Amino acid sequence: MDNIVDLSTNLQNGVPSVPPPKHASHTVFYVITSILLLLTSAGLGVFYAFMFTPPVDFVPRTIVRIPDGASVQEIATVLTNAHIIKSPEAFAVLVRIKGDDTRMHQGEYYFESPTALPYVIDRIAAADFGIENVKVLIPEGYTRQEMAKVFAAEFPDFSADAFMNETKDMEGYLFPDTYRFFRTATSGQVVSDMRKTFQLKTADLQKEAQLQEKRWSDIVITASLVELEGKTAEDRAKIADIIYRRIAANMPLQLDAPFLYIMNKASLQLTQEDLYTQSPYNTYRNKGLPPTPIASPGLMSISAALHPIANEYLYYLSDKAGIIHYAKDFNEHRKNKQLYLK
């Protein structure tokens, strides 16, 4: 009888009250936990969808330029503004988690279709530009017209006419260098890169010209002349000094290089009649420097224009091998013509 439970004291309204099941609290715990897990999963899903998936306003065939030396935050801003990613904060955090913060590569990245954030990071870390990158060499001494032909031959979307219109006042200020562009490059992209490169490469030389109280435009014009008149650094610096002294003496420069610019003729092709051509670039008829550069000078020529080598000569000529022969007066110059140009 000891095992019989007396229920008489639990009778209420004639119905015995039954104690709650032993595991009821555990069941409630499991239900609540499951709900929380579901909510957490849903929250993570919403978070992932918001942070990691591409933005809805992505524009197909977008090209994004990552500048040289850009920080993770700066890259994130560029990508956000281009509608490649949604959250610059998520980009920065994930880059650091993946350990890619020191492996971000500069360049132009092509996004054909929307790309999830992790894959955007992977591409920039691997320098995966997404489209063929074409290397183009623009030699020192090239004119805008020659540059336009080179670019037009490489890029289907490049307009030579647009390039010439956009660079009307930029002769000599488009830096000759090796460039890399996508096959989809246009004149606007090319001009922007060449101008920026010129400013970057010549920044120190511009400051030096300012310290010497020399007009930068005169330096660039002189540099374009010596670029085509001489081959070695020494010859170019000597020719620069001759140019400055002839101008100071109120003598015409009598240079042949400008005829390449105005009529595409080299020294040995010029006739006596050509020397009387009516043009502001004809330094036989006009004194002083031409009105603009006649080509794109390299750093060697710009440096020569800034650092001329003092000498006693007023005349010079280049023989068929490109060797410069100098003369102190016209009689000596005439003898050099007979010796080296026959």
Image (cartoon, helix red, strand yellow):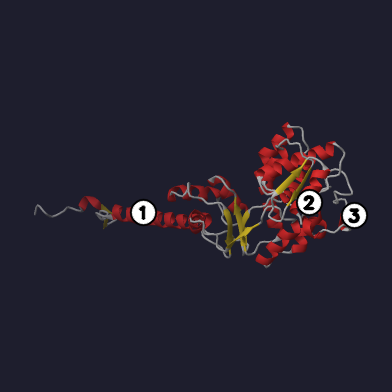
> For residue 271, what is the image quadrant?
bottom right
| Residue 196 rendering spot, x and y as whole percentages | 68, 48
Give the camera-side residue of 319 and 122: 319
Which disc number belongs to residue 227?
none
* Secondary structure beneath label 3: helix
Residue linked to disc 1? 33
Q: Quadrant of the C terminus?
A: bottom right
x and y percentages locating residue 157 in the rendered image:
69, 66
Residue 273 place in picture, x, y as percent: 89, 58
**Which of the marked residues, 1 or 3, is nearer the chain's N terminus?**
1
> For this rendering, which residue is in front, 44 or 164?
164
33 versus 305 height, above or below: below
The residue where tag 2 is placed is: 337
Of residues 304 and 144, the one nearer the viewer is 304
Query: Disc 2 marks which amino acid?
Result: Lys
Q: Quadrant of residue 332?
A: top right
Q: CA distance from mark 2 to mark 3?
A: 20 Å
Q: Amino acid at mark 1?
A: Thr
Q: Quadrant of the N terminus?
A: bottom left
Using a 10 Å C-alpha cutoff, classify the residue at mark 3 as few (fewer than 14 neighbours), some (14 to 19) or many (20 or more).
few
Local packing at callout 2 (Cα closer than 10 Å; few below 14, some 14-19, many 20+) is: some
The answer to whether residue 266 is seen in the rendering is no
> Which residue sits at x=79%, y=48%?
335
Q: Which mark is residue 276?
A: 3
Three-letter code, disc 3:
Tyr
